[in-house]
Image (cartoon, rainbow, N blue to C red):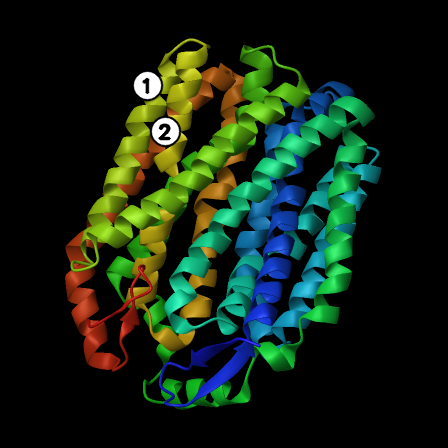
Amino acid sequence: MAFHPIAADDDDGTVVVARKYAWIVFALTFGLLISDYMSRQVLNAVFPMLKGEWALSDGQLGLLSGIVALMVGLLTFPLSLLADRFGRVKSLALMALLWSLATLGCALAQDYQQMFIARFMVGVGEAAYGSVGIAVVISVFPKHMRATLASAFMAGGMFGSVLGMAMGGAIAAKLGWRWSFAGMALFGLVLAVLYPLIVKEARIAPKRAANALGKATAKVKQPLRTLFSSRSVIATYVGSGLQLFVGGTVIVWMPSYLNRYYDMGTDKAGAMAAIIVLCSGAGMILCGMLSDRLCRHSPERKVALAIAYCLGSCALLSLAFALTAGPVQLAMICLGMLIATGTTGPAGAMVANLTHYSVHGTAFATLTLANNMLGLAPGPFITGRLSDAIGLHGAFQLVPLVSVAAAAVFFYAMCHYHKDIARLKGESVPDVVSETGLEVKL
């Protein structure tokens, strides 16, 4: 049987995990990530049905979507800390059980208030899955694969969104919107039961690695301070969140936009929106690969790339929504979304490089908090309110301008990045893992 050697950051010894088992852990954890985003995004596919059946405003629809991101943002940090303390596998299984039952509650909701409560609980269940799930996956693979796995894991959210909207729209068209939620819930419940039966805490959290981490952490006083100790890392949190305001909003409202301005049915609108989301997911990976290649010997270039992604997406999406409905507009939207989420890789690498390695899990939870509180939560709601006032097309013309603000914040980060990296070098001995997965000397 083949084994993966896994070395702790400051440990000369290694522990071994069966390669087959490592990939099983990845598959199950990735499957739950898919379930997470299917349960979150299926709502978008049935917006037109809910709007007609319950006579809802766009602001109310946007709040149903935004409340999930809001709870994810508020609870990611504390729940990630609890998962580290009480066991990641147990925590992930409980999270999946909660969001799946809450999604089933969406299927049974009889009015807007009940749907809102159910969506609230979906957000509570999904809150810390991303940061804790990445930690589980990384723990069973070699160090040199960490960046690759983390990128694939993050992009998996986009693919889950695609499945949620495409399958949700198709099911709703044939069986009604309630069955869309029920189907997502069943998938999640099956995986939630299987996960703790197959993935064992003792096999993914070797004691030697944990002891090595404890010794390494003692070398730096108060490593948690590095989460907010530099202007560039704070600016990175803010810039990433502002940019996801744009990408997240387009994903949420695209099925409704296609329904209203292209006269597409729920199933066709969901399928077309899924293609646009796929472009966004593919762009996340491609932009990350480009960042790896261009920034291998000059890590500070990643900030310049983040700025370029922001301004490029603003230009393309602004042009797209200045056009009338048609194939050209759809092509421009796809191009704009291809780079709209391109800041994810550079932002993640910047946060890793600007924080102490012993608190990277909490650092990514903080980044998730910023992404949700500044982008994914307010974006759909604010756009919904704008849509009520000036129409969805008019609202979409304003949304890309937020990318200009994101670019300005990343520029501020670039002005302080080199100095902050040098300051961290004086406090922390270990190397930092770049977004390429290579160890680079700071």
The answer to whether 262 is drawn above or below residue 167 in the figure is above
Residue 74 is left or right of residue 215, and the answer is right
Q: 208 or 50: which is nearer to us?
A: 208
The spot of residue 167 in percent (x, y) is 68, 33
Q: Can see residue 33? A: yes
Where is mark 1, residue-wise? 319
**Would you call the spot at circle 1 few (<14 residues within 10 Å), some (14-19), or many (20 or more)?**
some
The spot of residue 208 in percent (x, y) is 49, 89
The spot of residue 223 in percent (x, y) is 36, 78
Residue 295 is left or right of residue 54, and the answer is left
Q: 99 or 283: which is nearer to us?
A: 283
**Would you call the spot at circle 2 few (<14 residues within 10 Å), some (14-19), or many (20 or more)?**
many
Q: Which mark is residue 336?
A: 2
Q: Residue at x 25, y 60 (%)?
A: 231
Q: Residue at x 67, y 76 (%)?
A: 200
The spot of residue 403 in percent (x, y) is 32, 35
Amino acid carrying label 2: it is Gly
CA–CA distance in space, label 2 to label 1 = 9 Å
Locate the C terminus and report the quarter of the image it occupies.
Answer: bottom left
Residue 203 is left or right of residue 391, and the answer is right
Q: Look at the numbered disc 2 and give the secondary structure of its residue.
A: helix
Q: Do the CB atoms of the residues marked 2 and 1 lie less than 8 Å apart?
A: yes
Locate the N terminus and report the quarter of the image it occupies.
Answer: bottom right
Q: Look at the numbered disc 1 and give the secondary structure of its residue.
A: helix
Quarter of image, res 352: bottom left
Residue 287 is left or right of residue 325, and the answer is left
Q: Residue at x 33, y 74 (%)?
A: 356
The answer to whether 380 is drawn above or below residue 257 in the figure is below
